[in-house]
Image (cartoon, rainbow, N blue to C red):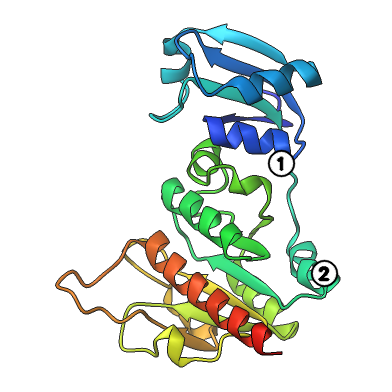
Amino acid sequence: MDQEVEWIYGINPIIEAIRADREIKEIYVSSGRKDKLDYILKEAEKRRIIVKIKDREFFDSRFPKGHQGIAALTRKRRSFSLGELIEIPFERKEVPFFVILDCIEDPRNVGAIIRTAEAAGVHGIVMQAYRSAGIGPEVVKTSAGATEYLPVSIVPNIKQAIRMMRDKGILIIGAEAGPYHAPWEMELTGPLAVVIGSEGKGLRRTVREDCDIIVSLPMKGRVNSLNVSVATGILLFEILRQKMLKFEKL
């Protein structure tokens, strides 16, 4: 397949790709798909995008469950260098707010984190080029199209990314299970980047040592851990809550 194009699948990711004005070369629809396609088909006609009808086997053989009988071949999304990513909030005159993913390999977790981060006002995501899920079709689907709006920078080494962010005055906050301060006990309204560790293993030791502070969510139940995307959502919205309270008082 042409290296300049990529697949996306699912209704919401394709709708958001259209709204974000990403170039779509072809849309493929299952012959059994009957509903919820009016917007997509109208936009395809308006934009002169080719629509092809395929049987279910076409989708089942290419995409995981949840493809919803629709896929699109699109031009690859823009990639951001770390420098470009860091400059986004400064150009907007906003307080920097980033998420760094330390070797999260499940694409569903990455997609869910991107969806939550975009909703919480995060400026961008940083992830490592290896031992990470990357931004593939399953990540896009799980993000419900949030990948169209939230910039992502894929870097060779997130430890170098952490140091570059710190040089820009960005506080590095590691999220880790354990006896650390709860996020609501900390002042989290300044420039910051939240580092999220991998499923099961958490932050790598060398990454943890590079963080300025570590926070954790207190556990009161018998199950002493949360899914990484759920824990990330709680932390990001606590940061958003603090920011909103601070700016409302100004």
- Using the rendered image of the protein, determine whether residue 61 is visible from the camera's viewpoint: no
Q: CA distance from mark 1 to mark 2?
A: 22 Å
* Secondary structure of the residue carrying numbered label 1: loop
Question: If the image is split into quadrants, where does the N terminus sit?
Answer: top right
Going by the picture, which residue comes out furthest to the left? 222
60 relative position to 143: left or right: left
Residue in the picture at 55% in, 88% down: 212
Residue 35: percent from the left, percent from the top? 49, 19
Query: Which mark is in front, 1 or 2?
Result: 2
* Secondary structure of the residue carrying numbered label 2: helix
Residue 4: percent from the left, percent from the top? 74, 31
Residue in the picture at 22% in, 73% down: 224
* Residue 3 vs residue 150, the one in the foreground: 150
> Which residue was labeled with disc 1?
77
Question: If the image is split into quadrants, where does the C terminus sit?
Answer: bottom right
Estimate how packed mark 1 is, as few (under 14), some (14 to 19) or many (20 or more) residues with alpha carbons within 10 Å.
some
Residue 248 placement: quadrant: bottom right
Residue in the picture at 43% in, 70% down: 234
> Which residue was labeled with disc 2?
92
* Residue 70 vs residue 170, the one in the foreground: 70
Of pointers 1 and 2, the one earlier in the residue sequence: 1
Residue 236: percent from the left, percent from the top? 51, 71
